[in-house]
Image (cartoon, helix red, strand yellow):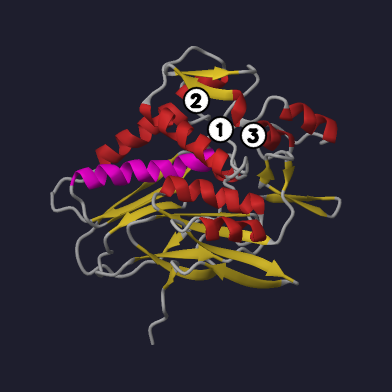
C-alpha cells in the first residue's frame, strides 16, 4: 500500500495537476503547504471575506489528530501507547480504515508501517530484508490487533503502530468540502496533495478538469507529461502509482507499494490507478487497494462495486494501455 505521503520526498502517489484556464468570473483561491505537501483550493463565494482562516483551522486540527510527523498529535500518542482521548477526526478515519481493510481483505492496512520501514520507504533506513524478518513483523501488524473501545485505542501487542497517510489527505479534502457545503458554497474544488473533492462547476461554467499524469519513470513534475484529462463534479478523486517512488538494487526494481499480506513490494503491470468515489477519503484508500492487488483483481473489485469508477494505466509487452469504467468522463479535445 502507499505510505508516508506527508513528506515531500516520500510522496508515493501520482500527483494530479489541475488544468488552468482564464477565469471569466471571480473565484477565490487558497494555496499553501500542509501535511508535507501542497494544497490548492478554488471556490466561488459571494462574501468579501475569504475562508483562509477556516481552512487553516481545519488543517491544524487534522495535523494535531492524524499526523505521525507531529509528535504532539493524537496518533503519535497512540503509537507511543499513551492514554490519550480520541477526537472525531481520528475516530472517523480509523473506522473507515477498518471498513476498507475488511472489504479489501487486508490490501489496505494502516498498521503496515514497519514493512515500509524495513524496505526504506518509511522513517528508517533500509535494512537487509529476509523472510524471517518479515515474518517477525507480521506478528504485530494487522487491523485485528488494534481497535477502539470506550473511546480509547486498545492493542493486543504494544508494538502495533498505525499511519493513516494513505487516507488522511483524502479525508482532509472531504472535511474542507463539508465545511464549504455547510456555508452554502455551490462551486468549489479542494485538492490536498493530489487528492480531490469537488462540487459544481469552475469559473467558466464547465465541469472541473483534472489531469492524470503519464506513469513514466522520471515523470516527477505534475502536469509535465499528461496521460489524460478527467472531468469531474460532486465526487472525490485520487491517484496512486509506482513510478515516482522506487529504487533499483542489483538490477531489480522495488516499488513503494507494499502488499501487507506478504510485507513485500508488489510486482505486477499496473502502473497507476485513479479512483473516483463518493468522497475523497474512499478514493484515496481505494487507489491504494487497486495498486496492491494488481490489474486483474482491480477489475473484479470495480465490477463488484458500481459506486466507484477508475482509470487504470498498465503495461503490456512494453506498451501503455488503459482500462477505465464507464463513469469516467474524459474531456474531449475541442477543435
The answer to whether the residue labelled 1 contacts the one labelled 2, judged by CB atoms less than 8 Å apart, is yes
Secondary structure at badge 1 equals loop
Distance Cα–Cα, label 3 vs label 2? 15 Å
In reply to whether residue 96 is colored magenta, the answer given is: no
Quadrant of the rendering where the N terminus is positioned: top right
Q: Residue at x 26, y 60 (%)?
A: 200
Residue under numbered circle 3? 112
Give residue 144's position: percent from left, percent from top: 61, 28
Q: Is residue 237 left or right of residue 4?
A: left
Residue 73 seen: no
Q: Earlier in the sequence, mark 1 or mark 3?
A: 3
Is 197 or 157 nearer to us in this picture? 157
Q: Earlier in the sequence, mark 1 or mark 2?
A: 2
Q: Magenta residues, as a range?
A: 165-183
Q: Callout 3: few (<14), some (14-19), or many (20+) C-alpha neighbours within 10 Å?
A: many
Q: Name which of mark 3 and mark 2 comes first in the sequence.
A: 2
Q: Which residue is mark 1?
A: 163
Question: Which residue: 58% across, 66% down?
Answer: 214
x, y percentage for residue 19?
40, 66
Q: Which mark is residue 314?
A: none
- Relative to 40, residue 75 above or below: above
- How far is the residue under mark 1 from the one under mark 3? 8 Å
Q: Residue, x 70% and y 61% (percent of image)? A: 269
In the image, 257 versus 214, the foreground residue is: 257
Q: Quadrant of residue 319?
A: bottom right
Position of 144 relative to 122 (above/below) = above
Cβ atoms at labels 3 and 2 below 8 Å apart: no
**Residue annotated with mark 2:** 75
x and y, in percent, of residue 241 in the image: 60, 55
- Relative placement, left or right, of 130 versus 222 is right
Q: Residue furthest left?
A: 47
- State the residue lying farthest toward the front: 304
Amino acid at each position: 500500500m502507499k505510505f508516508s505521503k506527508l513528506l515531500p520526498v516520500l510522496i508515493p502517489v501520482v500527483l494530479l495537476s489541475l488544468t488552468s484556464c482564464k477565469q471569466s468570473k471571480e473565484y477565490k483561491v487558497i494555496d499553501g503547504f500542509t501535511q508535507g505537501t501542497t494544497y490548492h483550493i478554488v471556490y466561488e463565494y459571494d462574501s468579501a471575506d475569504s475562508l483562509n482562516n477556516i481552512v487553516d483551522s481545519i488543517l491544524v486540527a487534522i495535523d494535531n489528530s492524524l499526523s505521525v510527523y507531529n509528535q504532539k498529535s493524537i496518533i503519535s500518542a497512540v503509537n507511543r501507547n499513551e492514554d490519550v482521548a480520541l477526537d472525531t477526526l481520528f475516530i472517523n478515519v480509523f473506522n473507515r480504515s477498518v471498513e476498507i481493510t475488511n472489504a479489501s481483505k487486508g490490501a489496505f492496512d494502516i498498521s503496515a508501517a514497519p514493512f515500509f520501514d524495513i524496505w526504506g520507504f518509511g522513517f528508517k533506513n533500509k535494512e537487509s530484508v529476509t523472510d524471517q524478518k518479515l515474518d517477525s513483523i507480521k506478528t504485530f501488524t494487522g487491523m485485528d490487533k488494534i481497535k477502539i473501545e470506550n473511546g480509547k485505542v486498545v492493542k493486543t501487542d504494544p508494538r502495533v503502530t498505525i499511519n493513516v497517510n494513505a487516507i488522511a489527505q483524502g479525508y482532509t479534502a472531504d472535511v474542507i468540502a463539508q465545511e464549504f457545503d455547510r456555508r452554502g458554497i455551490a462551486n468549489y474544488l479542494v485538492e490536498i496533495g493530489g487528492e480531490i473533492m469537488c462540487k459544481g462547476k469552475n469559473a467558466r461554467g464547465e465541469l472541473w478538469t483534472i489531469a492524470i499524469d503519464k506513469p513514466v519513470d522520471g515523470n516527477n513534475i505534475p502536469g509535465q507529461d499528461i496521460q489524460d484529462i478527467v472531468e469531474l463534479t460532486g465526487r472525490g478523486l485520487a491517484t496512486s502509482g509506482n513510478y515516482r517512488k522506487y529504487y533499483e538494487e542489483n538490477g531489480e526494481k522495488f516499488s513503494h507499494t507494499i502488499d501487507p499480506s506478504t510485507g513485500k513490494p508488489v510486482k505486477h503491470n499496473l502502473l497507476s490507478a485513479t479512483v473516483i468515489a463518493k468522497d475523497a477519503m474512499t478514493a484515496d484508500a481505494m487507489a491504494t487497494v487497486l495498486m496492491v492487488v494488481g490489474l486483474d483483481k482491480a477489475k473484479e473489485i470495480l465490477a463488484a462495486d458500481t459506486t466507484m469508477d477508475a482509470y487504470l494505466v498498465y503495461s503490456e509487452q512494453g506498451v501503455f494501455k488503459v482500462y477505465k469504467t464507464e463513469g469516467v468522463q474524459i474531456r474531449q479535445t475541442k477543435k
